Image (cartoon, rainbow, N blue to C red):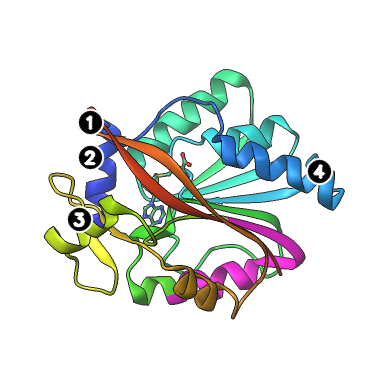
Amino acid sequence: MAQESAWDREYRQSQLLTKDNKPQADVVRFVTYLKKEQGIDIGGTTVLDLGSGTGRNSYYFAELGASVTGFEISKTAITIGKENADNAGLHIEYKKQSIGDIFPIADSSVDIMLDITSSNSLSEREREIYLAETHRVLRSGGYFFVKALCKDGDQNAKHLLEHSKGEEKDTYILPGVGITERVWTKNDFVSTYEKYFTIMHLEKKTSYSRMNNRSYKRNFWLAYMKK
Ligand SMILES: C[S@@+](CC[C@H](N)C(=O)[O-])C[C@H]1O[C@@H](n2cnc3c(N)ncnc32)[C@H](O)[C@@H]1O
């Protein structure tokens, strides 16, 4: 509940988050990989966007003809996402649903799943449910793209872990925001996900996040996985 209020406040005050409809460049690159290297036609696929925010990535898949569901805990984000989709005449199914709880969808019913910097906020207990549920709902041969916060070589993560430590391993609480985030070493990321999925591609990427009108250099893991 504390995390839910903190995220919702962010969408009302927006220090961290974007409300526009432009998909993340990393998501566009993942779609190019699916099309060119895996021969996937996005039209007609079933997509689940975990922590969909205001839906910029959901929107992109819907424009490409996919049937998209977004799970999101912030009511404000869902309202904005629905308005954007309605204005564009796109149908996206946004559900107020924690990705750390049992997913209200059938086994093996999803072709493509996205977690674009969303599950970093889960507790260890919630993450166990998230892993079991993502594995349960993804069909065999389906794809999962995870973008997660990286610990390795990230000076901001190091500073936050030293000065604003959270209760669980490799977590900190964003000062003034109250959101908890987990950062991942390569070893921890791989050993967590490889129990459930085959990691086909893993890369470390550096980019900039904005908060309180400042830009912070952050490292991320980009993982393309398959069940
Ligand atoms: C950094 S934002 C990214 C949003 C979106 N994936 C994007 O790329 O624009 C993280 C999102 O995850 C959502 N979130 C955090 N914890 C969640 C949870 N337990 N269940 C569902 N959504 C959650 C937040 O409200 C927020 O919208």
* First-in-chain label (2 vs 4): 2
Q: Is residue 1 visible?
A: no
Q: Identify the image quadrant of the C terminus.
A: bottom right
Amino acid marked by disc 4: Lys
The span from disc 3 to disc 1 (Cα, nearest Å) is: 25 Å
Q: Quadrant of residue 132?
A: bottom right
Decide: is 117 above or below 16: below
**145 or 204, which lies in front?**
204
Are dots 3 and 2 in contact, CB under 8 Å? no
Residue beneath disc 3 = 159
Q: Residue at x 59, y 47 (%)?
A: 69
Decide: is 128 above or below 183: below
The span from disc 4 to disc 1 (Cα, nearest Å) is: 37 Å
Left or right, 85 with respect to 124, comes to right
Q: Residue at x 27, y 31 (%)?
A: 14
Left or right, 14 with respect to 44, comes to left
Residue beneath disc 2 = 9
Q: Residue at x 57, y 35 (%)?
A: 25
The magenta segment is: 128-145
Which of the numbered marks, if any, corresponds to residue 13?
1
Mark 1: is the Cβ under 8 angstroms from ligand 1? no
Q: Callout 3 environment at 10 Å: few (<14), some (14 to 19), or many (20+)? A: few
Are dots 4 and 1 in contact, CB under 8 Å? no
Q: Does residue 134 belong to the magenta stretch?
A: yes
Please state the horizontal and vertical placement of residue 208, each as a whole percent of the image: 38, 37
Secondary structure category for the residue under label 1: helix
* First-in-chain label (3 vs 1): 1
Q: Is residue 68 visible?
A: yes
* First-in-chain label (4 vs 1): 1
Tell how many labels: 4
User: Which mark's residue is nearer the viewer, 3 or 1?
Assistant: 3
